[in-house]
Structures are given as structure tokens and as C-alpha cells.
Amino acid sequence: MQTSVSVKDLTLSFGAVKVIEQLNLDIGQGEFLVLLGPSGCGKSTLLNCIAGLLDVSDGQIFISGKNVTWEEPKDRGIGMVFQSYALYPQMTVEKNLSFGLRVAGFKKEEIASRVARASEILQIEPLLARKPANLSGGQRQRVAIGRALVRDVDVFLFDEPLSNLDAKLRGELRVEIKRLHQRLKNTMIYVTHDQIEAMTLADRIAIMRSGVIQQLDTPHNIYNRPVNLFVAGFIGSPSMNFINGELQPSGEPVFNAEGISVPLKGYKFDGSAPVGPLNGVLGIRPEHVAIGAAAAQMPFSSESEIEIVEPMGSDTIAWTKLAGQPFTFRCESEVILEVGQKIRIGFDPARGSVFDAATGDRV
């Protein structure tokens, strides 16, 4: 795949504080890459460096093969959509869409053509004569996306564009952005702290922490084979269950914790298995836990008592304990669960993750 955006040895410092250090990232032509992480992890800072809104301390940035490290944002061939809509309140939607093109000296026919195309793609043709005050939040964000779209660039940058919207609108616009990418096939770099947005939109996700990319992979691999405890705990709602114990790799490997011994037959170690016993953490996702008769068929099962029940509508989350540690499982909403109920829970450890307790890395 041809590279669209390349970040090489990027370092950004604010005084003595290094926010990003020696970061490298290649984004393919037409790829939808999501920068995901908690607040303060450096994802928006990285996006602003690519956009040219922040001057880097060291390193280089290439867009479509051109070194743009010191180019002005308008000369980088990008379109950007911000968290705030940043629309001109005194202008109509049509004027907001066309403003940048008019300033750049485009001909009227070209401006009209681009505005019409963006309006048709985003389904905002009936709104062109309105002003932002007469639009809903979702409509305003569509206009903000359209303003980037009319520039007809190769790379689009999105900085948490849906975070100001309610849950229903976020879901609707998420679908619109995915449809937009499938239609345009442009490179898109999207910043969010919302893992659902990341998992549903991305071709690849870069999970960041303290200015460092922890894992860069497909949503499927990040969900099923997280490289460390941070990634495993950050992806998934409710979060992955973590059981502290000891990994015994000799012979048939097992994971021992208080009162339980979990066989690890079928578990794929990253590289070769450790030579000796290791303080470890066993991670199991709540949705991979079976209950009742199905649990008894699993390689590992245990009796447990339900402590909290959370009906979620489409499914139910239950809190219990395993090896004396908090443990949650997800089941269908039709299953009736009660606090204090004794239930058998089970899982296949081959679907789980084992981490080194000392380093946090996947074993």
C-alpha cells in the first residue's frame, strides 16, 4: 500500500516537557486510522502536528511524499474538522462552505460545483440558506465536515468531531462518516477517546499513552490480542477481567490463583513460553464467559455468587468474584439473574490473554 502520511522521529516539547518523543507512524493511501487514548495521551497533539497547527521540536512529516514539516496548514493538502463546529454565525450554510474557496480565489463555477457536491454527499442541500443558529448539533457538524470536504484534498483530519453530540446523534454521524470514507476513499486520521467510535470506524487503531503508541493494529487484533495490560484494559466495555496469580509454564502450562488452577491448553504465547514460574495476570473478557450448563462444558469453570446485576437492555452485566478478585460476565437479557444467586461460570483460556505482572506485556 502506498504511504499517504508519514511521521518520522517526531518530537514535540513544551519547554522542558516532552509530550511526544521519537514517534514514527506510516498511514496508507485511503486508510482510516484512529488515534485512540485517554485525555492527555498526545493524540490531539500528534494530529495538530500533522495539520501544521503546532511546530515540531524535531523530526519530519510527509504528506503524499512531500516534506511538509515547515509548511503552513493551508499548503499541506489537508482538510480538518474540529471538536467545535467553528462556523461563522452570521453566514448561511452555503457561505460557510464556500468561504475558504472564495478567499483562495476560486472561480464562481468551481465554488458552486464543489459546494453542490459536498452538500449532496452530506445530504445538507435543504440547509444551504439557513444560518448555524437554525441548525441542530448534528447538522452543524455535517456543515463543518462539508467545509473540509469542499477543499478536495487527499487527507482529512478529524479532532473528536462527535464529542459534543448526544449518543443518538453520535451513532448516526458515525455511520455517515464511515459511508463518507467508503465513498471518497480518502486518507482519514481521526482522534477520539471513544473506543466504540474507534472500533467501528478504523481500518487500524493507534492506541496512545503518554505520547507513545502502545499498539498499532486492526480493531480485531487489538480486541483479541492486546499487547499489554493498558491496551487490554482500555478496550472493551465493561473492561477485561484481570486475575492476579502465577503462570506455571512447564509441562502443560497452567495459571494458578487463589483457590483455582486454569489450564492454558490452546493458549498461543507471543513467541516461546516463559521458562520458569512467572507472576502474571490472566485477562478474560466478560463476553467470553459462559454460565450455567454451557460453563460446565468449558476447559475451566467454577461456582460463584452474584453480587451486582446491571440490566443493559440488550444484555445484562453481572458482577461476581473469582479467586477472591472482582469478575464480571455478560449474558443475554432474557437470562434472569439475582443478587446472591449461586451460578457456575466458565471460559476457554485460549480466548484470554496472559500478561507479565512486572512489565505489563503480553506473554
Image: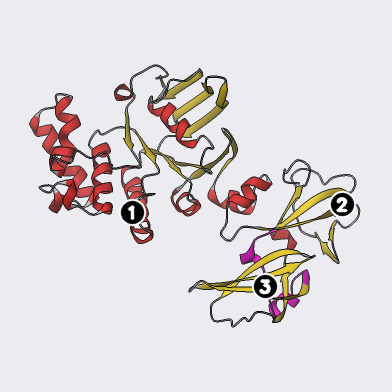
Locate residue 351 relative to residue 104 in the image: left or right: right
Badge 2 density bin: few <14, some 14–19, many ≥20, Cα 10 Å: some
Kind of element beneath mark 1: helix
Of mark 1 and mark 2, the one earlier in the sequence is: 1
Q: Which residues are magenta?
A: 284-301
Which percent across, then down, holds residue 12? Answer: 51, 23
- The amino acid at mark 3 is Ala
Q: Which residue is mark 1?
A: 173
How is colour applied across the structure in the image? secondary structure
Of mark 3 and mark 2, the one earlier in the sequence is: 2
Locate residue 278 relative to residue 334 in the image: left or right: right
Q: Which mark is residue 249?
A: 2
- The amino acid at mark 1 is Leu
Please name the residue shown 47% across and 20% down the image: 56
Which percent across, then down, holds residue 126? Answer: 13, 53
Q: Which residue is mark 3?
A: 290
